[in-house]
Image: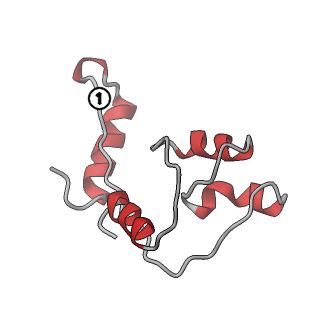
């Protein structure tokens, strides 16, 4: 899938009815909501490794491609320290297609 909207379209075309009240782009918040029984979520398996081992969360294997995720890094140039600058340079070197 090119993005999460394509996944939404696949779900709709499969005649699965989902009451999607929220679209959250912070997986830690998504995980907390799922643990509090506010629905289901998807995200990196590595982020729920402990919860899977403790049987607090369960995994559903899917045979569909995972949506790609676009992200941005925002910063205030006036507030950058050396660590922040090194991190930004690292990301620029390692991640392709940075505009």
Where residue 47 sits in the image (x, y, percent)?
Answer: 62, 55
User: Crowding near pointer 1: few (<14 within 10 Å), some, many (20+)?
Assistant: few
Residue 11, above or below 48: below
Quadrant for the N terminus, please: bottom left
User: Farthest residue toward the bottom?
Assistant: 63
Where residue 76 sits in the image (x, y, percent)?
Answer: 27, 23
Where residue 71 sits in the image (x, y, percent)?
Answer: 32, 48
21 or 24: nearer the viewer: 21
Describe residue 1's horizontal placement relative to residue 20 as left or right: left
70 or 78: nearer the viewer: 70
Describe residue 64's horizontal placement relative to residue 57 as left or right: left
Describe residue 29's horizontal placement relative to residue 20 as left or right: right
Please give the name of the residue rendered at 45% of the width and 67% of the height, measured from the top-left corner: 11
- The type of colouring in the image is secondary structure
User: Farthest residue toward the right?
Assistant: 54
Number of labelled discs? 1
Where residue 18 sits in the image (x, y, percent)?
Answer: 52, 56
Residue 61, above or below 80: below
The secondary structure type at the circle numbered 1 is loop
Please give the name of the residue rendered at 37% of the width and 58% of the height, measured from the top-left corner: 4
User: Farthest residue toward the left?
Assistant: 99
Residue 54, above or below 64: above
Residue 33, above or below 49: above
Describe residue 55's horizontal placement relative to residue 46 as left or right: right
Q: Mark 1 points at which residue?
A: 75
52 or 20: nearer the viewer: 20
Please give the name of the residue rendered at 51% of the width and 66% of the height, measured from the top-left corner: 16
């Amino acid at each position: 899938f090119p993005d999460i909207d394509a996944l939404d379209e696949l779900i709709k075309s499969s005649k699965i009815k989902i009451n999607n009240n929220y679209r959250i782009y912070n997986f830690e918040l998504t995980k907390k909501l799922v643990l509090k029984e506010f629905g289901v979520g998807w995200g990196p398996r590595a982020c729920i490794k402990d919860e899977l081992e403790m049987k607090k969360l369960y995994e559903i294997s899917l045979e569909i491609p995972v949506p790609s995720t676009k992200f941005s890094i925002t910063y205030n140039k006036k507030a950058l320290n050396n660590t922040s600058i090194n991190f930004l340079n690292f990301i620029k070197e390692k991640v392709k297609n940075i505009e």
